[in-house]
Image (tube, rainbow, N blue to C red):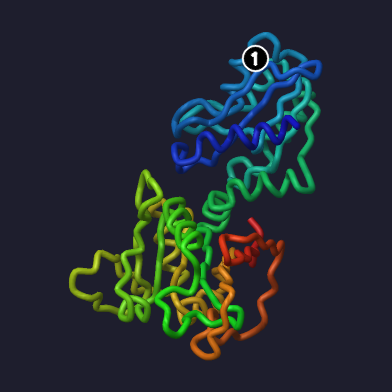
Amino acid sequence: MSLERALELAERGRGTTRPNPVVGAVVVRDGEVVGEGWHERAGGPHAEVNALQDAGERARGATLYVSLEPCSHHGRTPPCVDAVVAAGIRRVVAGTADPNPEVDGQGLERLRQAGILVELASGELGWRARVQNESYRTWIARKRPFVTYKAAVTLDGKMALPGSRWVSGELSRTLVHELRARSDAVAVGMGTVRADNPLLSARDVGATRQPRCLAFGRGPLPEGSELELVDAPLEAALRALADEGVQSLLLEGGPTLAASFFRAELVDKLLLFVAPALAGSGPGAFGALPAPVRLRRLTARPVGEDVLLSAYVHEP
């Protein structure tokens, strides 16, 4: 499907469009793809403009499939809706609306006012379009980073396995380094710092950039630690990080840090690596919560001998 192709094209801009979202676009006329494009870099042409330029005159009377609502405001580039109207596009199918207050439905409305048929995807494709930019969506709409809490546990929910340094397997640990490489910041609590003095860097996965490595709590940090100490109320700390361009935060701390973020309703996504072992005793992953937390869109997939459970607390 053409919208699926737009989602695929969007991923080509992953890592080069910040602070903008990743976006892909496809132009279809008479059942044939006549133009493709994606947002390649911040400050450069947006996906719609690139796809329309690729299509040329064949864009007139065609359908534009775009993974995110076209922008309607002047930023570093002109409004994409103007280019869509000028190209003579007949119909636009967007994967999801843009939560940016400067857009947020205004782009689609401008297209309707110009006489262009507009559709907004629903179901699985609409969800995929939202998830593709989940960090951007939270950062731009809630003025804080998208927070993912990651933990490795045994089948009985314990975070330590007696007699073993690791709870999860090697493939799971590699995936964690990939998650770090895709995150703007990684954080633990001071309890983890004092116990393990972790590096939190992304290693052996070809990372093109390293995340900021943070420790939440009261210092001092151990001598030689390269972590940044964050000693402020969580809401204020996350606002400050967002102001500094941090869109995604991966939490790797223990139950005390997890409980603090859950109590403040600041966890958006949960990643739980479940290992095929029983610990029998030891700390759990979440500490004491004031109330049950309802999870949404639970999925499970094998990672080596482990199972990765993924769920949302707040949908993007």
Depth check: give the residue in front, 151 or 66: 151
The residue positioned 48% from the left and 56% from the top of the image is 179
Instruction: Give the residue at x 69% y 20%.
Output: 85
Q: Position of residue 180 (x, y in %)?
A: 43, 57
What is the count of numbered marks?
Answer: 1
Residue projecting furthest to the bottom? 281
Q: Residue 230 appears in which quarter of the rendering?
A: bottom left
Comparing 268 with 162, the one in front is: 162
Left or right, 119 with respect to 134, comes to: right
Q: Secondary structure at mark 1?
A: helix
List the residue tagged with mark 1: 55
Q: Is residue 150 above or below residue 171?
A: below
Camera-side residue of 76 and 228: 228
| Residue 184 sits above or below residue 165 on the image | above
Q: Where residue 184 appears, x then y in whole percent?
A: 42, 54
Residue 144 visible in the snapshot: no
> x and y percent of residue 188 in the render?
40, 71
Residue 53, picture quadrant: top right
Residue type at mark 1?
Answer: Ala
Q: Is 198 positioned to the left or the right of 129 in the image?
A: left
Residue at left offset 78%, top offset 21%: 90
Towards the viewer: 233 or 178:
178
User: Can you name the residue that lies furthest to the left here?
Assistant: 223
Task: Assign the C terminus to one quadrant of the image.
Answer: bottom right
Quadrant containing the N terminus is: top right
Q: Up-down: is 293 above or below 212?
A: below
